[in-house]
Image (cartoon, rainbow, N blue to C red):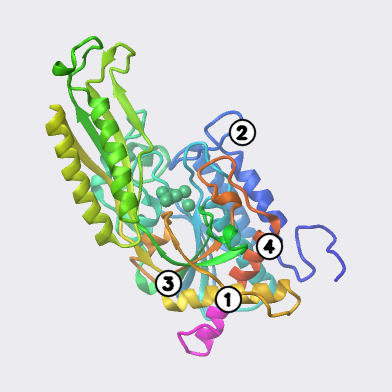
Amino acid sequence: MTPPADDTMRNDGARTAAVVLERCDELARHSSLPDGLIERVYLSPEHAAVNALAAGWMQGAGMDTWQDAAGNQCGRLEGATPGLPALLLGSHLDTVPSAGRYDGILGVLTAIAVVERITTSGRSLPFALEVVAFGDEEGTRFGTALLGSRALAGTWLDAWWELTDEAGITLHEAFVAFGLDPAAVTAAARTSNDFVGYLETHIEQGPVLEENDLPLGIVSSIAGARRFQITITGKAGHSGTPWTHRRDALAGASEAIVAIERLARDADLIATVGHLEVFPDAVNVIAGRAEFSLDLRGRFDADRDSVWQQIETLLDEICATRGLHVAVHQTHAAPAAHCSDRLRGVIAAGIRAADLRAADGADDAPAPLELLSMAGHDAMAVAHLTEIGMLFVRCAGGVSHHPDESVTEADVARALDAFEAAVLALADGHQAGSQDPA
Ligand code: HGY
Ligand code: MN
Ligand code: MN
């Protein structure tokens, strides 16, 4: 095939991986951090800027666009007849602090590029296509994650309005400042009848695909997560205080953190303490208070919850021994979400089609690999409404939530072909009236 005039479009008019990667770079420039570091939080000026960029690319792909009542950027391409239920595609545009440029973002841009390919092909599908760029998957600003996707799923909680960010701004105030009406947030809620399913492309954020020398994988299920703020209180005092008279909150927290890691490892769970603050935080003062976060996740909610009960007992024992007090506040909980057989099937069909295309028809590719996602995703919230399916893309070293996050253009090209083929496999199955993919 003669190379296309430029690398933005393939000969067949398909939007290329080069453009998707350029757009990732363009979105990365909208950050609240200096020196090329990336942080983009919910309801920020950076959030507004990337919503506008995504809206323009959605329109360029042939979609009508709107920002929903929770600040998610949405686009829609009608199917064979107007008003059909939609296959929802998407991911998130917000980030953690000092983030990579593909977590979430690659999924939004892959979805837009695939809709553009379908628009260009002129094919009309037996369902509409909607793309959603969720505004808050990470929970970086207000601590509770999946706010955008929970608004769409209709599971918003009014208790969240008083959540505050580091500057003490409430979620309610941030909504108003962003131009949204808190009283109207439920207008973002969709119903199960609106959708035929949800598909999300996302970097793996783990090493499995790379270890298996595979560019793509099928997500079997997403681990359920619970997050806590744990405060250990003792008594601040002179660092020369004898051992018999010390109630050291930092020593107690440290003992707890190492013990929590052991409990999680033994139970095949993942526990992460990513934040620790000490008061009064001075070299010659015994810590009177230590506050730390806990992110606890596992394949099955029951296992996770049973280990959490063990952790609560452990905290009580350590505090009793050391004369300390513990207070626990749960800041987030999301149940494990299982990808449906039907949508795992279309993702598998998409990967096989992309493998065939890449090998010019030689069908010697291994069967697509299924893997658990220990990372959380908006799909967990959307699972409340409709079936979910996820396509994983290899990322170097499994690194994510870090500036070194990276993907290859070849893998993104393969993902574009696979995601497009998955959508078409679902359409073919839909047209044939079967629930199974072609
Ligand atoms: O925390 C997670 O797993 C996701 O990246 N928000
Ligand atoms: Mn993330
Ligand atoms: Mn993500």
Determine if the C-beta at disc 4 is less than 8 A from ligand 3.
Answer: no
Is 350 above or below relative to 210? below
Q: Specify which label sits upstream in the sequence, 1 or 3.
A: 3
Q: Which mark is in front, 1 or 4?
A: 1
The crowding category of the residue bearing disc 2, from other C-alpha atoms within 10 Å (few below 14, some 14 to 19, many at least 20), is few
Disc 2 marks which residue?
A: 36
Disc 2 from disc 1: Cα separation: 39 Å
Is 351 above or below relative to 407? below
Q: Secondary structure at mark 2?
A: loop
Total marks in image: 4
Q: Amino acid at mark 4?
A: Ala
Residue 29 percent across, percent down from the top left: 61, 38
Disc 1 marks which residue?
A: 367
Q: Secondary structure at mark 4?
A: helix
Q: Amino acid at mark 3?
A: Phe
Q: Secondary structure at mark 1?
A: loop
Residues at circles 1 and 4 in contact by the CB criterion of under 8 Å: no
* Circle on res. 159: none
Q: Specify which label sits upstream in the sequence, 1 or 4.
A: 1
The crowding category of the residue bearing disc 1, from other C-alpha atoms within 10 Å (few below 14, some 14 to 19, many at least 20), is few
Disc 1 from disc 4: Cα separation: 19 Å
Disc 3 from disc 4: Cα separation: 27 Å
Left or right, 355 with reference to 152? right
* Circle on res. 195: 3
Disc 4 from disc 2: Cα separation: 26 Å
Q: Specify which label sits upstream in the sequence, 4 or 2.
A: 2
- In magenta, the rendered stretch is 422-438
Determine if the C-beta at disc 1 is less than 8 A from ligand 3.
Answer: no
Disc 4 marks which residue?
A: 413
Q: Specify which label sits upstream in the sequence, 3 or 4.
A: 3
Q: Which mark is in front, 2 or 3?
A: 2
